[in-house]
Image (tube, rainbow, N blue to C red):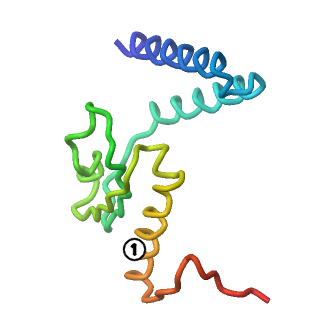
Amino acid sequence: MENLVSRWQWSAIAHLISEEARLQLLDESAIVPMLRIFYANSQAAQRYVPHPYPNRITLFRATEQPDRIGQNLTLGWGQLTKDVQIYHIPGNHLSMLKQPHVQTLAQQLQQCLSQKTGVTESLSDPPCLC
C-alpha cells in the first residue's frame, strides 16, 4: 500500500511539474532541486516518530484544508499535548505565507508573542538598531 501511495505522489508531482512548465510558472533549472527537497522531506516524514509534548503548542491553522484533514481541528497535535492554542489564518498551507494572508499571520504571531512576553511593539514599526 505504501508503495502505491508513493507512486501516486510521484505521479501527482510529475503532473504538477509538467503543468507548471507548460504555463511557464516554473524554471526548468528549479525542477531537480525541488524534487530532491520533496524526496528528503518525504523520507524524513516517513521516519519521524512524534512523542508527547508536556507544554502548550501554538498552531497557526490555515482556514482552507484538504478534505482528508479538514475535520481534525488540531491537525493531529491534540494527540501529542493537552493544550493546543489555535490561530486561524486565511488561505491554505502555502497561500497563508503570501500577501494578503501573511499580514493576518503576522498580526496573530505578534499577538501570540506579546501574550507570552508582554511586549506589544508593532511589527510595522521595527526597532532602530543604530
Is 14 displayed left or right of 113 in the figure?
A: right
Whether residue 14 is situated above or below residue 43 in the rendered picture = above
Q: x and y percent of residue 117 in the render?
A: 44, 85
Camera-side residue: 41 or 73?
A: 73
Q: x and y percent of residue 81 in the render?
A: 26, 58
- Amino acid found under the numbered disc labelled 1: Cys
Residue 52 lies in what quarter of the image?
A: bottom left
Q: x and y percent of residue 7 in the render?
A: 47, 11
Residue 30 lies in what quarter of the image?
A: top right
Find disc 1 in the rendering and name its residue: 112
Q: Say which quadrant the N terminus sits in.
A: top left
Is 130 displayed left or right of 90 in the figure?
A: right
At numbered mark 1, what does the secondary structure look like: helix, strand or loop? helix
What residue appears at the point 39 percent right and 74 percent down from the top-left corner? 112
Is 1 displayed left or right of 21 in the figure?
A: left
What residue appears at the point 60 percent right and 19 percent down from the top-left corner? 17
What residue appears at the point 74 percent right and 27 percent down from the top-left corner? 27
Residue 114 lies in what quarter of the image?
A: bottom left
Q: x and y percent of residue 25 in the render?
A: 65, 28
Camera-side residue: 79 or 33?
A: 33
Is 109 displayed left or right of 125 in the figure?
A: left
Q: Say which quadrant the C terminus sits in.
A: bottom right
What residue appears at the point 66 percent right and 86 percent down from the top-left corner? 127
